[in-house]
Image (cartoon, rainbow, N blue to C red):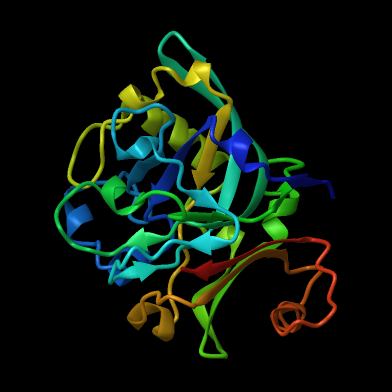
Amino acid sequence: MNRHNIKLDELKDYLGFGVAGNFANHLGEAGEADEFSVIKTDEKDAPKGLFPFYIPNHDSFLSQFPICTDEITHNDIEHLQVEAEVGLICDFVYENDKLVDLKPKYFGAFNDCSNRIQDGNKLSTKKNWGKGSKGIAHDFIEIDSFEEDGILNKFHIASFIRRDGILRDYGTVSAVRSYSYFFNQLKTWMIDKFNTQEDLGPLEELPPFIKDINKHKGLLIAAGATAYTEFGKHHFLERGDEIFIYVYNAHFHSFEDIMQDMAGSDVFLSQCSKLHQIVK
């Protein structure tokens, strides 16, 4: 298994997008179901759409690089929640004003941290408040095949908060394969959305965001947030909180390995992408 060291300066030349509603019940738990009620999907559990969280050189707040490996900036925002996700670093093919192909190369732990204010604005406005709005693990893992028989099918997502010395589950432990859409189904769906998504409800028209994509290195995709535990549903981030997100091979590492790692034991998580951030 090959690892890929994340260099933040390189990611500044990637476009960042997230998938909305790719885990059952997440939008309802996040208080966003009403806003998305205008979005109709072909299948009941299909994701709702894509949203931008970072567009280099865009003439808006989206040009602010929000990704950090060790901090989340609180900014006195009352309702911040962790969104534990699989991040995908992708190559692409863009020809004749269309996205023709997406090629996921690496995956790892990602925090699509979100402001839960319900103000009727676009989802993207709740995703980027400047430096330290997002989290990414130091190490990603090379994707052998973005198919159901590839290594990703063995991985789970787990997330935790340590507050006042007490460790709590924040998101439910979820298998990557339990995403509503993943592997080729997600890839095909994303290509279609990048080319056709219109401005509706909390989502924006996407083709204008990618028209200059050939000037950039790639795409960083946040594949969707897991459901929350009872603690995660009702507790927002506070300064001093420690965030832990693990994307780990559940056929190789036990949940006990993850707990020991957070306790500071000398555990070597060789098949894991780990994100550890402090809220400041």
* Whether residue 147 is visible: no
* Residue nearest the observer in this picture, 205 or 124: 124
* Vertical order, 166 against 218 (above or below): below
Along the viewing direction, whichever of 27 and 181 lies nearer the viewer: 27
Q: Picture quarter containing residue 60?
A: top left
Residue at (37% x, 33% y) in the render = 193
Residue 65 in view: yes
- Residue 91 located left or right of residue 40: right
Q: Residue at x 36, y 60 (%)?
A: 114
Q: Position of residue 215 (x, y in %)?
A: 51, 17
Whether 211 is drawn above or below 224: the answer is above
The quadrant where residue 199 appears: top left
> Whole-percent x and y of residue 75?
34, 63
Residue ID at (22%, 54%): 36
Rendering coords of residue 237 (x, y %): 40, 74
Extreme-top residue of the structure:
96
